[in-house]
Image: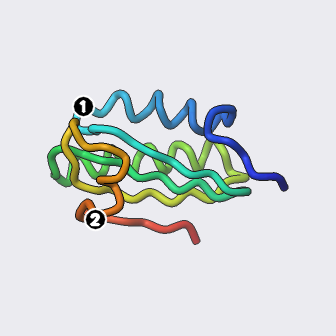
Amino acid sequence: MSTLTHTDHRAVADLRSALSLIPAVASAHCKISDALVTVWVGIDQDSRDIREAVYGVEEFLGDRHPDLKINFRVIGLSHEAGTDDYVSAPLIYQRTAA
């Protein structure tokens, strides 16, 4: 299978749409390689409800795109954070595809 680009993959559109409904999501970045989608979700506040909402998006994507393995990483960031900040941001929680 060829590498998918983030701009033309339906899962990315679904990801954007679903995460836009969670106000605490500051931004998100993803990397798609073959059938693995790794998503870094930056949130500007942490609570169990917010994490459950974000991981609900992961489950939604998994159900909608069963051919993909999805790996979400939730990190603490502000709305002003840049892409480079994702590397050094504190990891709040991670669930990895099996």
Which residue is found at the position 44% from the left and 57% from the top? Answer: 72
Distance of label 2 from label 1 (alpha carbons): 19 Å
Image coords of residue 77 (percent x, y): 22, 48
Name the side, left or right, on which 48 lies relative to 4. Answer: left
Residue type pointed to by label 1: Pro
Which residue is found at the position 69% from the left and 32% from the top? Answer: 8
Picture quadrant where residue 11 is located: top right
Query: Label 2: which residue?
Result: 91
In the image, residue 72 sits, relative to residue 25, either above or below, namely below
Name the side, left or right, on which 27 lies relative to 30. Answer: left
Image coords of residue 9 (percent x, y): 67, 36
Picture quadrant where residue 27 is located: top left
Circle 2 packing at 10 Å, graded few (<14), some (14-19), many (20+), is some
Asked which secondary structure carries label 2, the reply is strand
Residue 62 or residue 41, whichever sits in front: 41
Rendered image: mark on residue 48? none
The image quadrant where one finds the N terminus is: bottom right
Picture quadrant where residue 10 is located: top right
Image coords of residue 63 (percent x, y): 60, 46
Name the side, left or right, on which 95 lies relative to 21. Answer: right
User: Answer yes or no: do the residues labelled 2 and 1 have beta carbons within 8 Å?
Assistant: no
Rendered image: mark on residue 23? 1
Residue 90 or residue 55, whichever sits in front: 90
Residue type pointed to by label 2: Leu
Image coords of residue 29 (percent x, y): 45, 45
Q: Residue furthest right?
A: 1
In the image, residue 61 sits, relative to residue 40, either above or below, namely above
In this rendering, the count of numbered labels is 2
Circle 1 packing at 10 Å, graded few (<14), some (14-19), many (20+), is few
In the image, residue 50 sits, relative to residue 48, either above or below, namely above
Asked which secondary structure carries label 1, the reply is loop
Look at discs 2 and 1 and give the one toward the viewer: 2
